[in-house]
Amino acid sequence: MIEKIRHYQDKCDFCGTCVAVCPHDAIELAEASLQILFNRCTLCAFCIQGCPTRALEMSDESAL
Ligand code: SF4
Ligand code: SF4
């Protein structure tokens, strides 16, 4: 199973906390759009822990 960070746009308030806590600059936030850069992400899960609205989850790729 290949795991990835999944982002739920409808739960996100674009606060930028996940961008601030990501140690690998793997999250890009533009006005109302958030992108995970999977080539940089190490699945450390700091962003999941830091998200106040639970808009991020660990997900296996087949579920995307
Ligand atoms: S921390 Fe959560 S709510 Fe804030 S921008 Fe990131 S995904 Fe969205
Ligand atoms: S899991 Fe870690 S490396 Fe990946 S986007 Fe979240 S904070 Fe960044």
Image (cartoon, rainbow, N blue to C red):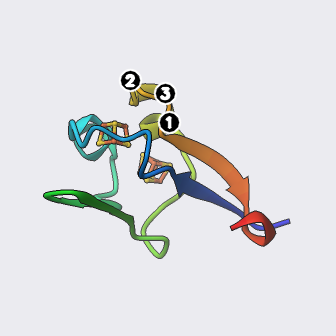
Q: Amino acid at mark 1?
A: Ile
State the separation of the CA atoms marked 1 and 2: 9 Å
Residue 2 or 7: which is nearer the viewer? 7
Q: Secondary structure at mark 1?
A: helix
- The C terminus lies in which quarter of the figure? bottom right
Quick check: which quadrant has ligand 1? top left
**Residue at (47%, 76%) from the top-left corner?**
39
**Residue at (73%, 69%) from the top-left corner?**
61
Q: Amino acid at mark 3?
A: Gln
Q: Which residue is mark 2?
A: 52
Residue 29 left/right relative to 59 = left
Q: Nearer the viewer, mark 3 or mark 2?
A: 2
Label 3: few (<14), some or many (≥20) within 10 Å?
Answer: few
| Circle 1/circle 3 CB separation < 8 Å | yes
Q: Secondary structure at mark 3?
A: helix
Residue 57, by quadrant, is: top right
Queried on whether the Cβ of the residue with tag 2 lies below 8 angstroms from ligand 1, the answer reads yes
